[in-house]
């Protein structure tokens, strides 16, 4: 029973949780959401640009996209965040003062965009070449055909992977604590950790973890639902197909099929 | 085989006029050459399709038929040679503008699966012809009606049969009011029972005066609808002429062998 008691005191200290709750809600949750959302938006925009550049027929566009992706996908997130957050601090100082928060968002966005770019690229590449050909045959330029026909289908196809990436981003946002944010800028993890250190047990951190789950678990269900819809939609498409009786012929002539 | 008179009865006579009866122009190519690397796919192709007539291109796979179609609407640029529409070279034109004048129908339909049947037809009308959404929807309705699919306007192509999808693809191309229509094995991917409906739609179009260049394996269609049949092999037009001549009295050994295999 001693062990159970110790565990309970470590993880389920209600008083410690209650003490940490207001900050977790008002500061931590808000900051985690701001960090994750803004870098998701910026990362998605940058990712789309990277995907389009990566698929370009022009070498001078394809190549930088490739290098960028290799770098930001290949570095540990902590390294990127420190390099950007600390390394660019002098530049940031001139723009928005001594505030590491925007640099944290920038670093998260750059990392996210490398992954999201690859997700988009694979989605766009998976679309049948006939789609662009059909668009161009109607009179669309290659660019318009990509924009109106190919990219929308490619994005739809990778929505589950994209949401997965957003989930990763919510968790990864905790790494900005490396940058030593102000009290009001601290995210869920940092507030949980500070409170845990003060109270001498891990209950506040556990509570912070629960907040992460409150964000990420619904997102995983969104992924599954989107995935299921896409799958069922596609299967339904295939299932009808040619079996459906072709009852709507204008049937004005009969054309023999053999000479 | 029984002779076929293409379309003596036009479906809903009014709708045809509304949708704009086809007004095809002459198409010609002069000495078209095209190679992919060392693979010389087209080796000097000349063809003349008079305005408002149908020419069928037959031949073994790999003979360059589909490539030739793509040169005519400049999805592929020839290495050498010329493409003429209505007697005028189009190789110096803006290729996107040219493609609005030349409709194309593909073996695998290539409908846009993320759009409804109606949106498939209106996409080009809105974005390329600058029609308002309502005007485009109106026109789409008429063209879908003409191929007997107006009642399917709000579904996605995936829920249609192959034959229905191909007729939507034809409506999509016709809505752009092309002067020439290209058909690239338009019935090859269809189940046998669905082929007839698509061929009937094509025969109607031919009868209405569209200029059509049709790559096909449907010899019956070539015989009954085309004014001209071209036999391609090895990147060249080996033999061409009126259907009866080509099918009844093939002059070259290659065509004789081909016909004996497909008929």
Image: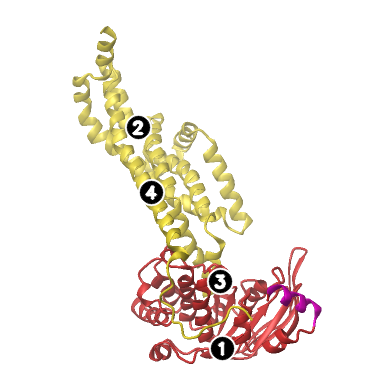
Chain colours: A yellow, B red
Q: Quadrant of the N terminus of chain B?
A: bottom right
Name which residue lies at 37% across and 72% down.
Answer: B152
Specify the quadrant of the image occupied by residue A163.
Answer: top left
Residue B16 position within the rendered picture, expressed as x and y whole percent measured from the top left? 43, 88
Asked if the magenta segment contains residue A132, the reply would be no
Pick out the residue farthest to the right. B253
Taking B47 as reference, is A83 above or below it? Answer: above
Q: Which residue is mark 1?
A: B4
| Region in magenta | B252-262
Q: CA distance from mark 3 to mark 1?
A: 25 Å
**Both on one chain, marks 1 and 4?**
no
Per the image, label 2 sits on a secondary structure element best described as: loop
Residue B158 position within the rendered picture, expressed as x and y whole percent measured from the top left? 43, 63
Per the image, label 3 sits on a secondary structure element best described as: loop
- Near-viewer residue (A30 or B177): B177
Residue B106: numbered disc: 3
Mark 3 and mark 2 residues within 8 Å of each other at the beta carbon: no
Per the image, label 1 sits on a secondary structure element best described as: loop
- Near-viewer residue (A92 or A242): A242
**Both on one chain, marks 2 and 4?**
yes
**Both on one chain, marks 4 and 3?**
no
Residue A181: numbered disc: 2
Q: Which residue is mark 4?
A: A228
Q: CA distance from mark 3 to mark 2?
A: 59 Å
Closer mark to the observer between disc 1 and disc 2 = 1
**Both on one chain, marks 3 and 2?**
no
Closer mark to the observer between disc 3 and disc 2 = 3
Q: Earlier in the sequence, mark 2 or mark 4?
A: 2
Specify the quadrant of the image occupied by residue B33.
Answer: bottom right
- Near-viewer residue (A107 or A144): A144
């Amino acid at each position: 029973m001693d062990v159970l008691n110790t565990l309970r005191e470590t993880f389920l200290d209600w008083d410690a949780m209650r003490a940490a709750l207001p900050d977790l809600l008002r500061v931590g949750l808000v900051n985690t959401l701001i960090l994750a959302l803004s870098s998701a938006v910026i990362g998605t925009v940058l990712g789309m640009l990277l995907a389009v550049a990566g698929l370009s027929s022009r070498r001078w566009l394809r190549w930088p996209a490739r290098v960028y992706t290799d770098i930001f996908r290949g570095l540990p997130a902590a390294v990127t965040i420190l390099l950007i957050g600390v390394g660019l601090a002098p530049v940031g100082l001139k723009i928005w003062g001594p505030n590491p928060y925007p640099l944290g968002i920038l670093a998260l966005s750059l990392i996210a965009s490398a992954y999201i770019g690859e997700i988009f690229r694979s989605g766009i590449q998976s679309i049948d070449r006939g789609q662009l050909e059909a668009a161009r045959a109607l009179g669309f330029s290659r660019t318009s055909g990509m924009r109106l026909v190919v990219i929308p289908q490619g994005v739809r196809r990778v929505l589950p992977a994209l949401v997965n990436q957003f989930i990763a981003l919510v968790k990864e946002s905790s790494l900005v604590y490396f940058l030593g944010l102000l009290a009001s800028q601290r995210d869920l993890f940092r507030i949980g950790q500070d409170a845990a250190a003060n109270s001498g047990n891990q209950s506040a951190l556990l509570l912070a973890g629960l907040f992460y789950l409150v964000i990420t678990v619904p997102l995983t269900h969104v992924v599954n639902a989107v995935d299921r819809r896409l799958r069922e939609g596609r299967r339904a498409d295939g299932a009808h197909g040619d079996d459906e009786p072709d009852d709507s012929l204008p049937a004005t002539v009969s054309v023999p099929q053999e000479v | 085989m029984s002779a076929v008179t293409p379309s003596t009865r036009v479906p809903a006579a009014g709708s045809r006029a509304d949708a704009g009866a086809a007004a095809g122009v002459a198409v010609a190519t002069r000495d078209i050459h095209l190679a992919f690397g060392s693979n010389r796919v087209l080796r000097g192709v000349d063809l003349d399709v008079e305005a408002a007539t149908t020419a069928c291109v037959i031949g073994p796979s790999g003979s360059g038929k589909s490539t030739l179609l793509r040169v005519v609407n400049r999805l592929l640029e020839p290495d050498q040679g010329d493409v003429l529409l209505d007697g005028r070279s189009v190789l110096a034109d803006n290729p996107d503008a040219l493609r609005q004048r030349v409709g194309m129908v593909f073996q695998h339909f290539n409908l846009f699966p993320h759009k409804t049947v109606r949106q498939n037809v209106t996409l080009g009308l809105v974005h390329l012809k600058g029609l308002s959404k309502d005007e485009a929807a109106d026109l789409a309705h008429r063209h879908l009606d003409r191929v007997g699919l107006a009642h399917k306007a709000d579904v996605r192509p995936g829920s249609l049969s192959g034959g229905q999808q191909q007729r939507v693809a034809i409506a999509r191309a016709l809505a752009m009011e092309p002067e020439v229509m290209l058909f690239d094995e338009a019935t090859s991917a269809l189940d046998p029972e669905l082929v007839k409906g698509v061929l009937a739609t094509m025969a109607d179009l031919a009868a209405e005066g569209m200029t059509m260049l049709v790559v096909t394996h449907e010899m019956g269609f070539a015989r009954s609808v085309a004014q001209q049949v071209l036999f391609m092999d090895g990147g060249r037009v080996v033999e061409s002429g009126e259907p009866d001549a080509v099918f009844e009295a093939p002059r070259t050994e290659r065509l004789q062998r081909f016909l004996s295999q497909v008929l």
